[in-house]
Amino acid sequence: MTNSENMLAALDNQNLELAQEHFQKALKTDDDQTLAALGQELEQIGFIIEAKEIYEQLLAQHPEYDELHLSLANIAIEDGDTEKAFEELESIPATSASYVAALVTLADLYQLLEIPEVSETKLLEAKKLAPDEILVSFALAELYFSVGQYKKAVKEYAQLNALEIEETTGISIYERIGVSYLYDGHIEHALEFLEKAFSDAQNPSDELLYQLGFAYYQLKDYPKVIHYLEKLKEQNPDYYNTEYFLAQAYLAEERLLDADDILKEGIAKNPYSASLYQLASEVAYRLKDANRAEDYLLEAITMDELRDENLYRLMNFYLQEGRLQDVFRAYQEMEIPEHAQANWVLAAAYKEDDKFEKAKEHYEIAYEGLKEDPEFLKDYALFLRENGEIAQANAYLAQAAQLASDDMEIMDLLDNEEE
């Protein structure tokens, strides 16, 4: 046996002292090929210092072994020594058989440094030199995917053999293309590929299940949202943000108790998500638990995220409960007093409180942000009509009719006025 083989055997037996003895002998007696193989094996099992020593010794003896610069660069990247990594990679000349691999590694390094434009340049050069090298095309596709250039990503992924890539990298090309289409807004195309990835996968990834659930959520196909996200919950109960979309789907299917339970679980895991409290409040209110609905919103407004949005929801809650003074008080806490929806609620509260001038003032503020909302226009028109401003009311009703020609109530109001 060579000293390299003896070292590996000692490592298998967890005899580090003996392994180190054989390592020192190997450096002195084993041939270059055996040493190079030992370096690769040691690098794979985490003995980086010893692997590096082998590569540096071989390179000092044989400067023409360019591939050793690549190995040393990869070690430097793992160590966080980008300067050393660049030095090693730039030592590989364009005439070297390792040059394309060096370009790919340089691209990885520039991406690590958040300079994707240079990464792209390196990969395009590599592809020009090796147009049939699948890992170069794959690296280019992954770069485009990571920076959100999904059309370019799809084009690169489509050139690859899906089975070959999955065997080599463990990544599903179908899933990548599906997610690219999904984030680019082509949901139907996305689902073709995501479903293909799912049918091919013996053990579908958490990410794939989530993306399928999210895609069907965009299409409002709530039974399928529930199907995939329940699978995800079973597979990984801690996967991020599952509870929110699953609760939305339960809510759409009128499964209020299931929505309530999953939101309680989500809040227990992530007590700082204002959107979870917001949705939990809506569910609690529909379950006729007004106290808990209020508590969730009060908790939500303690967070910076969606603060005004949740204050508006709290105002709406108080309006429905007839707590007008609490509506006025909540509005005073808003950071953006021109918030259109909040001003609509405030106008309704002043109307209930028989303060018509104040109500009109806030209807006018709300109008700036809600002039394209036929429900708001209809409500404002009815308010104006009640107060004798018929011409302006009819103008708003006509505006609403253009936006919602299928709203029979608006049409009836206009017809009645004409008669």
Image (tube, helix red, strand yellow):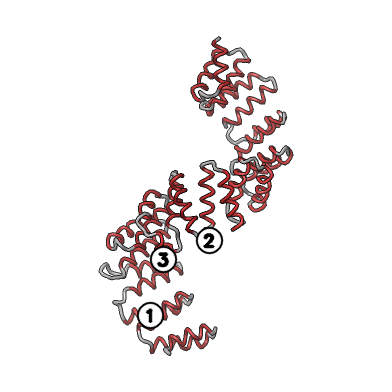
Q: Which mark is residue 82?
A: 3
Q: Position of residue 192 (x, y in %)?
A: 45, 49
Q: Crowdedness of circle 1 by 10 Å Cα count: few (<14), some, many (20+)? A: some
Q: Are marks 2 and 1 in contact (CB under 8 Å)?
A: no
Dot 2 or dot 3, earlier in sequence: 3
Q: Position of residue 349 (x, y in %)?
A: 67, 26
Judging from the image, what secondary structure is the residue with disc 3 in? helix
Residue type, numbered disc 3: Thr
Q: Which residue is mark 2?
A: 203
Horizontally, residue 307 falls left or right of residue 34, namely right
Residue type, numbered disc 1: Ala
Q: Position of residue 133 (x, y in %)?
A: 32, 63
Depicted 29 relative to depicted 384: above or below: below
- Please report the residue visible at 58 percent of the width from the left and 34 percent of the height from the top: 336
Q: CA distance from mark 2 to mark 1?
A: 37 Å
Depicted 259 relative to depicted 49: above or below: above
**Quadrant in the rendering for residue 104:** bottom left
Q: Which residue is mark 1?
A: 36
Dot 2 or dot 1, earlier in sequence: 1
Judging from the image, what secondary structure is the residue with disc 2 in? loop
Q: Crowdedness of circle 2 by 10 Å Cα count: few (<14), some, many (20+)? A: few
Image quadrant in which the C terminus is located: top right
Depicted 122 relative to depicted 2: above or below: above
Front of the two marks 2 and 1: 2
**Residue 146 visible, this angle:** no
**Residue 202 visible, this angle:** yes
- Please report the residue visible at 60 percent of the width from the left and 22 percent of the height from the top: 379
Judging from the image, what secondary structure is the residue with disc 1 in? helix
